[in-house]
Amino acid sequence: MVNLSLMCLGLLSLWGVRGEVAPNFNHCKKFFFRQTPVSGLNIALPTPVETKTQKLVNPKKCLSAYNAASPAYICQIYNNQYYFATLYDRGRRIPLYSAYKMDIKGEPERNGSIVNYEPQLVHPGLAKNQMKKKECLTEIKNYNKNQSNDCKESFPQYRQTYKLSWSQALNDDFGTYTRGHLNPAGHHGKGDASQATMTFTNVAPQNPTMNQVQWNQYEQKLKNDLSQGCSNMYVVTGVVPSTTWVDQNQRVNVPSHYWNAFCCTDNNDKPLRSGGALCPNTDEGVVTEYNTVADLQNVLGNDMSFGSNFNIFFNRCQI
Ligand SMILES: *[C@@H]1O[C@H](CO)[C@@H](O)[C@H](O)[C@H]1NC(C)=O
Ligand SMILES: *[C@@H]1O[C@H](CO)[C@@H](O)[C@H](O)[C@H]1NC(C)=O
């Protein structure tokens, strides 16, 4: 009995610390068609490595994202609930894609701005909820304090803002670009579901015109036309990284394109329709639509170097 309850305690505490940044999407497979995550996308850059480590006490424990795997698999949690999944490129500090189920009937709400950050990109043991900057910094402060005086903030590398900005893009990292949603707030109902999209791990630098005009029109078409008659609408929206960066320090990458794939199914989750789109991230970028996911995958695989193992949906959501 004693052993059993000890074991339970052990399991519980494992359960407790398991977070949303994990080695895979096992905790949020439900956001993918047939619970099958996107596969074969091996284009992320490695996590940046701090070079100035002389004199630092316990860098292994105290540096932000020390030895962290890239990409990071984020099961997005807001107010203790899972809302969608994001594959995050730590080297480029942008998401490669976000996967979600559209709220087909939900009334769109687009208030507020991008305010949340992902604490677990800094240290895997931090809180699993997305948080506003101030709360995130407090998390980091408490973590630093907890490490028996090792992570002293007299080391610039251990300071709260430095550690947060090491692990992800901050609000002032976007230059003249907009903070372009991958998973858009407008595909979800009011309240927490749309607020959960307001996180820096779900946005990339997007050309302002392309964001407000061409891509916005396509997002509305997805919601208003392409989801007609579907019981479920699985959506994956991603970007194609480029060799352009917002700033000279190459902190945050500017994607060359945004892409989208959708899989519309009936109430038995049988595919009814599928397709996708691709648009250059420029003023004049034109949205090209695809009637099959296979066609989109061929373009991304061959012309955009995603590779031949890249697969968005189980069996390509073939009807
Ligand atoms: C958005 O609007 C809802 C109600 O309309 C409100 O409860 C919520 O606080 C707003 N969110 C932001 C970030 O302003
Ligand atoms: C710091 O330690 C306290 C007490 O053990 C704990 O409750 C808290 O979650 C820790 N915070 C962080 C960010 O590690």
Image (spheres, helix red, strand yellow):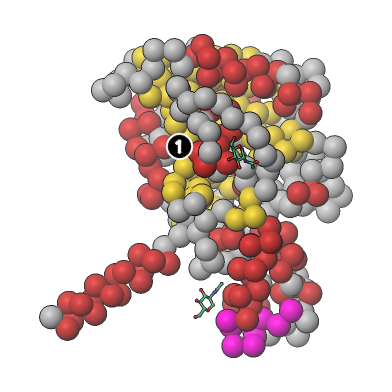
Question: Which residue is at 69% across, 28% downward?
Answer: 257
* Position in image of residue 141 (x %, y %): 65, 73
Residue 197 falls left or right of residue 48: left
* Position in image of residue 167 (x %, y %): 66, 59
* Position in image of residue 279 (x %, y %): 67, 22
- Towards the viewer: 113 or 25: 113
Label 1 sits on residue = 38
Q: Dot 1: what SS?
A: loop
| Residue 123 in sight from this viewpoint | yes
Question: Which residue is at 47% across, 42% downward?
Answer: 83
Residue range corresponding to the magenta coloring: 146-153
Q: How many marks?
A: 1
* Quadrant of residue 137 within the rendered picture: bottom right
Name the magenta segment's main secondary structure: loop
Amino acid tagged 1: Val
- Quarter occupied by the N terminus: bottom left
